[in-house]
Image (spheres, coloured by chain):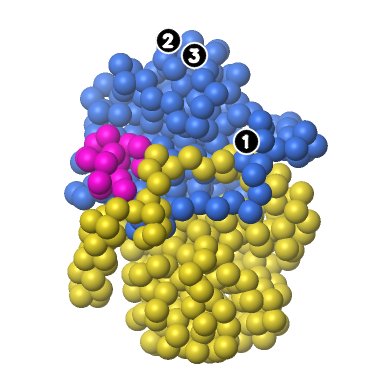
Chain colours: A yellow, B blue
Amino acid sequence: MVIAIPIFEGLTALDAVGPYEVLSRVPHADVRFVASTIGAKRADSGMLGLVADYALEEVPSPDIVVVPGGPNARDIAAHSDLVDWLVQAHRTSQWTTAVCTGSLLLGAAGLLDGCQATSHWLALDELARYGAVPVLDRVVEDPSARIITCAGVSAGIDMALLLAARITVPEVAQAIQLGIEYDPQPPFDCGSPAKAPREIVELVQMSAAHEQGQT
Amino acid sequence: MVIAIPIFEGLTALDAVGPYEVLSRVPHADVRFVASTIGAKRADSGMLGLVADYALEEVPSPDIVVVPGGPNARDIAAHSDLVDWLVQAHRTSQWTTAVCTGSLLLGAAGLLDGCQATSHWLALDELARYGAVPVLDRVVEDPSARIITCAGVSAGIDMALLLAARITVPEVAQAIQLGIEYDPQPPFDCGSPAKAPREIVELVQMSAAHEQGQT
C-alpha cells in the first residue's frame, strides 16, 4: 500500500504531517514524500524543512495520494509538474485526497469536475472555478470520483482517520486514534468561521489577503 | 521570541509539527528546530525526515522550549546531550514544555521534581520516577515550575494554542486556531483510554509493548 504525499516549497507542514502521522501507522503502509526533486522543502513559514525522499517520477502509481496545501497553492496549481503528476497518478489510485488548499491542485489537474469537494474556508469559493461543487463540511467524500477533500490544515487528521477506516477496518483507525491520543480539547471554540467571533474572522481574512498580496 | 524545538532520530513527527504549526504563526515568533547535529532527522516510522537548522549549542537560551517525544524517548533520556541542553535552557526559558513522551526528557533533566505533569497515557506512570506528580489531563500547566506538558502526539496542538494565548493574548491564539481551521471532528470517539472500547485499548497496549521490546 503505497501512500504518496507530494510536497513543494512553501507547503503548510501540518497539512502533510497530520495525515502522515495517521497513515504511517496503517499496517503495511509505505508512506512516501515525493516532490519535483528529492531533498528538503521549506514550509510556508520558512522555519521548517520536510524531506522528500522520492522524485515524482519514481512514484507514478501510488495507491493513495494526499496533497497538502499552502499559501502559494494557486501558483503551484498554475504551473507545476506536480499537477501533471496528479493527472497521471489519479488514473490508478484508489483514493486521491487533499488537505486545505491542496484541493486547488486537484482542481487544476481536472480531477474535481462535477465533484463534491471542500477546502480551507478562505478558499472554498475558488473550487467552483474547477467545476467542483463546494461543500462546507470538514471532510467531503465523493466515492464515484475516488476523491476525498477536507477543510484547512488540521482537518487532515480527521480525513486521514476516515481514510484509514476505508482502506482497512474501523478498528484499525480507532487504534491509531487512541495511539496518537486524538481526543481534541481546543482551549477555544473558534476553529470555524461559524463559531469564531466576527472580529477574529475579519482578522484572519485581512491577514490572508495581505499574504496573498505578497505572493 | 525564540521558540526551540529540539528533535532527534526516531521522534514522533506530529509531536513537533503540531506545536510548530501553531507557534510559527505567533507574531514575531522565531521557531528553530535544533538537534545535536544540523540536518535531517528521521521520524519513528522511518518514512519522513524533519530538518534541524541549528545545533543545540547555537540556541542556548530560547524563550520557549517544546520537546517532542518518540518511542525511543527512554533511550534519549538515558544518554543524550539533549538532556544536558534542557537543563541549561530551562534556566532562562519563559516556558519549557513537552508533548507526549517528551515529558520523560524533561524528567531526565530533573525539571519535573515536585511538578505536576502529564504524558502519553501509556507513559503516564513513568513520570513518578522523576519525582513528578502525574496528572491524567490533556494539558497540564505548572506555572511555578514554568513547565507545561500534554498528552500524546496530537495533544501538542491543544497545548500550543494554550501557550500562544499565554505568551500573547487570547485573541491571537483564537486567530491561529481559525487559521488552521482547528474545529476537530474525529470520525470516532476513542481518542483516550477512558473512551475507547476495551479491545482497542488492549490492542494499542500490546502493540506498544511489542515496539518497546524491539528498541
The residue at which mark 1 appears reads as B192
Q: Nearer the viewer, residue B132 or A124?
A: A124
* Distance in Å between CA atoms under marks 1 and 2: 26 Å
Q: Hey, what amino acid is under mark 1? A: Ser
* Number of residues whose C-alpha sits closer than 10 Å to that of mark 1, classed few (under 14), some (14–19) or many (20 or more): many
The answer, for residue B105, to whether it is visible in the render is no
**Number of marks in the image?**
3
Q: Chain of mark 1?
A: B
Q: Provide residue B31's location: percent of width, then percent of height.
A: 30, 47
Q: Which residue is mark 3?
A: B133
Q: Residue at x 70, y 47 (%)?
A: A174
Discs 2 and 3 lie in a common subunit: yes
* Label 1 and label 3 in one chain: yes
Q: Is residue A95 magenta?
A: no
Residue B68: x %, y % from top left: 47, 38
> Which label sits on residue B81?
none
Q: Nearer the viewer, residue B100 or A145?
A: A145
State the separation of the CA atoms marked 1 and 3. Answer: 20 Å
Residue B47 figure quarter: bottom right
Residue A49 percent coordinates (x, y): 40, 58
Q: Are marks 1 and 3 in contact (CB under 8 Å)?
A: no
Asked whether B187 or A105 is in front, the reply is B187
B191 w.r.t. B142: above or below: below
Tell me the kind of residue under disc 3: Val
Look at 66% across and 32% down and name the residue there: B193
Q: Residue at x 48, y 27 (%)?
A: B103
Q: Which residue is mark 2?
A: B114
